Image (spheres, rainbow, N blue to C red):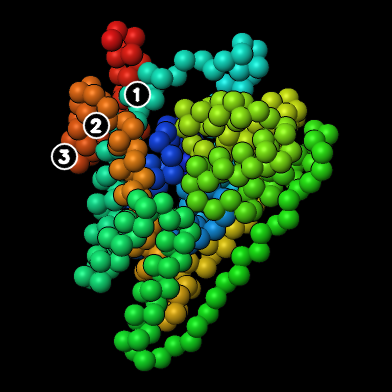
Amino acid sequence: MSHSRSSLGEVLHLFLRLGVTGFGGPAAHLALMEREAVEHRGWITHEQFLDLIGGCNLLPGPSSTQVAMALGYIRAGWVGLVVAGACFILPASLATLALAWAYVRYGHLPQVAGLLYGAKPVMVAIVAQAVWRLGRRALRHWSMVLLGAACGAAAFAGVPPVAVLLVAGGLLLAIRLQSTQSGRAAGVALLPLGAAGGVPGLGLGTMALVFAKLGVVVFGSGYVLLACLQADLVDRLHWLTGQQLLDAVTAGQVTPGPAFATATFLGYLLHGWRGAAVATAAIFLPSFFLAAAVGALAGRLRRSPLAGPFLDGVNVAAVALMAEVGFSLGRGALVDVWSWTLGLASAALLIAFEVNATWIILAGAGAGIALRSFF
């Protein structure tokens, strides 16, 4: 399959911009990709985009990064996948690396509260708009609406995201099979890797194994990653203190792009510049191969009489999970009259005037810094 340079240039331009401005976590990243790749550029349909989200949510690793890679693969082949992944990951990793350097040099993180204060309300508006648009396509029947409500309730109750996705897919598949009185069962076994081991000698090879294992076995959001990092790096290997891990996760949250860029900060703490490079490469490398499989197989799966209904159920659950994350983000972001004003103004600009989300994010971040400085 040949792809023009213009297609590759589109991939580079879009994901480099999203890598620089993509604050707010996976739900916000997916909302931005849906707006840019589906609404504005028409690379794929809304239904195909939902299938990518559903497929990547079933994989270990950073789901929004894998969707970016899969979009790059669909648009410009293997080179597009690599370019999309690199452009989305590198800005976050470089920003996190700069914070790690400042943390080691000065003993604390630079003040970034104002930036988050202004950027997060904008992201709430972007997520809400995406949930509305994708939900109208995923919830096509009353049974899907009921399933979506059940998935949302399960997510709020703390059920692991992967369990919500798998059960939703299985339920809808069972309903379809029962209605046709045909079909056969299928299953997938997930075999977690053994712990990369040993007493912390801080060798690059051992560190690479630990972070590669995390890239292969961590399902769900950055909060799941936090739990796994605590279990491996703090409790088992004793490479870091709990406070150092918390500071690293904070750095990953205040920079744009994937939360898995926290690995860059941790690698720098453990082994300097080389450690940052090794940890970043190790934790993200599995996603390049997994995302390629989703991008290549999504269309075939949709045509399968078994996989199609399963994907429908997974897509319903994915929208419900996005809504739950958006609600949680809103509770933390809309805390006073100024943040509510930023959020509502952002929603108006997005829906009524269709202003480019990138400019709204930058304006929100700037407004947050100014408000924190004067109030």
* Amino acid type shown at disc 3: Ala
The span from disc 3 to disc 1 (Cα, nearest Å) is 24 Å
Mark 3 Cα shell of 10 Å, populated few (<14), some (14-19), many (≥20): few
Asked whether residue 368 is in view, the answer is: yes
Q: Nearer the viewer, mark 3 or mark 1?
A: 1
User: In this view of the protein, can residue 98 be seen by the observer?
Assistant: no
> Which label belongs to residue 226?
none
360 up-or-down from 78: above or below:
above
Measure the alpha-carbon separation of dots 2 and 3: 14 Å
Residue indicated by mark 3 = 352
Estimate the x, y position of residue 23 in percent, counting from the top left.
Answer: 42, 33
Q: Is residue 315 above or below residue 269?
A: below
The single residue placed furthest to the bottom in the displayed view is 181
Sequence-first tag of 2 and 1:
1
Q: Pointer 1: what residue? A: 117
Quadrant where the image shows the N terminus: bottom right
**Tag 1, which secondary structure?**
helix
Residue 136 position by quadrant: bottom left
Image location of residue 148, percent across then percent down: 30, 62
Of the numbered discs in the image, which one, if any, rests on residue 343?
2
